[in-house]
Image (cartoon, grey):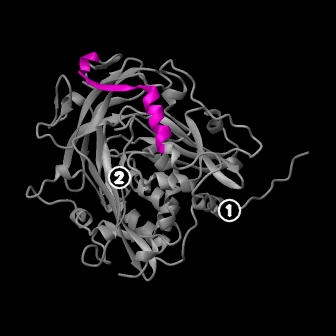
C-alpha cells in the first residue's frame, strides 16, 4: 500500500528561530568560548607544521606543461593554474587563475544540547593561514580530498553530508568562491542536523559550539576561517521588518539589470601566453608588483589527511580592506552593496561589500581609488561597528588577509541616492539571497555571517547606540 504523502512547512521560519536561539547562547554545553583560542593554539603547537616557500622546480608531482605552460598535478586532479583573458565593461586584462571544476563540501554538523543547537567545529591546519590553525567546518574537503586522490586518510564525519535526509538539512546551497582568483569555483555549503539520540564521537580536533560562541570568535583576528564563515552566512535568519528602501522584487530587478548591462567575456588561455606577467623560477608575477603572485610552498608535519605535500598557491601583494557602509533609514538598518564584476564568476557579477580591494594596488596620487574606500578608512572610531582581520581560503591563498569592517556612515560619505552599481539593502534581504547560488560573493558572505550571528547586530541590524536615523 502506498503511503500518503505528508505536507511540510514551506517556510524556513522554524529553522531561523532555532538558529536565533543558538545565536543568543553566549556559552555552550561543552566548551567555553574563552577556551577556544588556547585550544587552537595547542593544536598549532602539537601539529608542528612548517610551511616554507620553494622554487617551482622543487614541487613534487607538479610541473608546467610543455604545450600550454599551465601548472598541473601529474594525477590530473586537484587544480591547475592557467591563464584567463577577460574583456569587461571598462577594461580588458589577462591573469593567472585557479581552475578547480570539482565541487567540494563545506559542511557543519549540528545537534541540540539542552534544547540549543550546537555546531561541530574543527581545528584545521591550512598552509596559507597566517597562524596555520583556525576554526573550520566539520567537513572541508574537495572531491579529490574525500575520494582520497592524495592517498591519505578518510575525511572524518563525511558520511553525514553525502546523502543526508532532507528533513535534517538546515541549509544546502552551492556558493561561489573568490572570483578574482578562481575560475567559476563553487562549493556545497551545508548545515546538517543529527538527532539528539544520535551518538557523535568527538575527535580531539573538534568541539561543539553555539552560534553565539562562534559570533564572539568572529570578533577575534584570524580565528574563524573563510569556509566556516560562508556556511554560516548561508543559514536562514529571521527576516527582520517588512520595510526597506527597495522591495525584494525591486532589489532583484536592479541586480538583474546590473548583470545584464555588464557584458563580460572570460576565456581560459595558456598560462605561457598571458600578457603583463612573467614566469620566474620562484613566482609568476607582474613586473609592476601589483595584485598577486603565484608561488610554491612545501608543507611538513601538517597533521591532516596527508602529513606533508607541496603545491602552488596564490599570494596577494598586501592586505585587503573589505567593508560595508551601514546607515539606518527610518529605524531600518541598511548596508551599501556593490554589483561587482570579477573575471572568474559564473554570472558576470555578484553582490559585494561597499569596498573590496587591496589598497596597495591604488597608492595615493597614482589615479582614482575605489569608491568609498577612504570614507571607511577615515571613519571616526566610534562609527566603526566591526573591525576584524580575517584570512581568506588557506588552502589556495598564502597570507591573504583582509580587514573586515562595518562602518556607520552618513549622507556626506554615502548618499541615500546610491551611485550606479550600488544599492542599499537590509541584512534580511541579503540573508534571503544567500540561500540561493551566485547572489552574494564570498567577501559579502563573511560580513553577512557577522550580521546574522552577532548579538550587537542581530535584533535590528545595528547596536542600540547607533539606532537613530542619520
- Checking the image for residue 284, the label placed there is none
Q: Is residue 326 visible?
A: yes
Where is residue 68 shown, x and y percent of the image? 25, 24
Q: Residues under labels 1 and 2: Cα distance?
A: 34 Å
* Mark 2 element type: loop
Q: Which residues are magenta?
A: 37-58
Instruction: Using the image as rendered, state which of residue 48 and residue 349 is in the foreground.
Output: 48
Find disc 2 in the rendering and name its residue.
348
Where is residue 217 shown, x and y percent of the image? 47, 51
Instruction: Using the image as rendered, state which of residue 100 and residue 201 is in the foreground.
Output: 201
Answer few, some or many: residues within 10 Å of disc 1's Cα (few below 14, many 20 plus, some between 14 and 19): few
Up-down relation of residue 116 to residue 98 (above or below): below
* Mark 1 element type: helix
Where is residue 107 shown, x and y percent of the image? 56, 42
Mark closer to the chain start, 1 or 2: 1
Q: Quadrant of residue 47?
A: top left
The reply, left or right, for residue 171 in relation to residue 411 is right
The residue sitting at 25% across, 21% down in the picture is 56
Q: Residue furthest left?
A: 365
Instruction: Using the image as rendered, state which of residue 391 and residue 285 is in the foreground.
Output: 391
Q: Quadrant of the N terminus?
A: top right
The residue sitting at 87% across, 46% down in the picture is 2
- Checking the image for residue 14, the label placed there is 1
Amino acid at each position: 500500500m502506498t503511503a500518503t504523502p505528508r505536507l511540510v512547512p514551506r517556510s524556513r521560519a522554524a529553522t531561523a528561530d532555532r538558529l536565533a536561539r543558538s545565536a543568543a547562547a553566549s556559552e555552550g554545553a561543552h566548551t567555553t568560548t574563552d577556551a577556544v583560542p588556547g585550544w587552537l593554539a595547542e593544536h598549532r603547537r602539537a601539529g608542528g607544521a612548517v610551511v616554507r616557500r620553494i622554487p617551482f622546480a622543487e614541487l613534487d608531482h607538479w610541473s608546467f606543461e610543455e604545450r600550454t605552460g599551465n601548472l598541473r598535478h601529474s594525477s590530473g586532479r586537484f587544480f591547475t593554474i592557467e591563464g584567463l583573458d577577460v574583456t569587461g565593461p571598462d577594461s580588458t586584462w589577462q591573469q593567472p587563475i585557479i581552475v578547480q571544476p570539482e565541487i567540494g563540501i563545506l559542511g557543519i554538523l549540528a545537534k541540540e544540547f539542552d534544547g540549543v543547537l550546537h555546531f561541530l567545529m574543527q581545528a584545521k591546519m591550512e598552509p596559507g593561514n597566517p597562524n596555520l590553525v583556525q576554526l573550520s567546518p566539520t567537513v572541508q574537503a574537495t572531491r579529490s580530498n574525500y575520494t582520497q586522490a592524495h592517498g591519505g586518510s578518510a575525511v572524518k564525519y563525511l558520511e553525514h553530508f553525502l546523502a543526508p535526509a532532507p528533513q535534517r538539512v538546515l541549509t544546502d546551497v552551492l556558493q561561489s568562491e573568490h572570483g578574482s582568483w578562481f575560475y567559476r569555483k563553487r562549493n556545497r555549503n551545508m548545515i546538517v542536523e543529527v538527532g539528539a539520540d544520535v551518538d557523535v564521537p568527538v575527535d580531539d580536533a573538534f568541539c561543539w559550539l553555539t552560534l553565539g560562541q562562534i559570533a564572539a570568535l568572529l570578533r577575534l583576528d584570524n580565528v574563524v576561517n573563510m569556509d566556516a564563515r560562508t556556511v554560516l552566512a548561508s543559514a536562514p535568519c529571521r527576516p527582520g521588518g517588512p520595510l526597506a528602501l527597495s522591495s525584494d522584487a525591486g532589489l532583484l530587478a536592479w541586480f538583474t539589470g546590473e548583470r545584464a548591462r555588464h557584458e563580460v567575456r572570460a576565456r581560459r588561455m595558456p598560462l605561457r601566453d598571458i600578457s603583463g606577467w612573467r614566469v620566474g623560477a620562484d613566482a609568476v608575477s607582474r613586473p609592476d608588483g601589483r595584485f598577486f603572485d603565484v608561488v610554491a610552498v612545501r608543507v611538513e608535519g601538517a597533521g591532516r589527511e596527508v602529513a606533508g605535500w607541496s603545491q602552488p598557491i596564490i599570494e596577494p601583494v598586501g592586505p585587503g580592506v573589505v567593508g560595508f557602509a551601514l546607515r539606518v533609514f527610518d529605524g531600518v538598518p541598511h548596508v551599501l552593496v556593490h554589483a561587482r564584476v570579477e573575471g572568474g564568476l559564473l554570472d558576470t557579477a555578484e553582490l559585494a561589500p561597499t569596498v573590496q580591494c587591496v589598497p596597495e594596488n591604488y597608492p595615493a596620487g597614482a589615479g582614482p581609488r575605489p569608491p568609498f574606500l577612504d570614507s571607511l578608512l577615515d571613519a571616526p572610531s566610534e562609527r566603526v561597528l566591526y573591525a576584524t582581520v580575517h584570512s581568506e581560503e588557506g588552502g589556495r591563498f598564502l597570507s591573504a588577509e583582509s580587514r573586515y569592517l562595518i562602518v556607520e556612515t552618513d549622507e556626506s560619505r554615502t548618499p541615500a541616492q546610491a551611485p550606479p552599481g550600488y544599492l542599499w539593502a537590509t541584512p534580511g534581504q541579503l540573508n534571503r539571497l544567500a540561500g540561493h547560488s551566485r547572489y552574494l560573493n564570498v567577501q559579502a558572505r563573511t560580513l553577512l555571517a557577522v550580521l546574522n550571528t552577532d548579538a550587537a547586530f542581530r535584533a535590528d541590524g545595528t547596536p542600540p547606540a547607533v539606532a537613530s536615523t542619520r
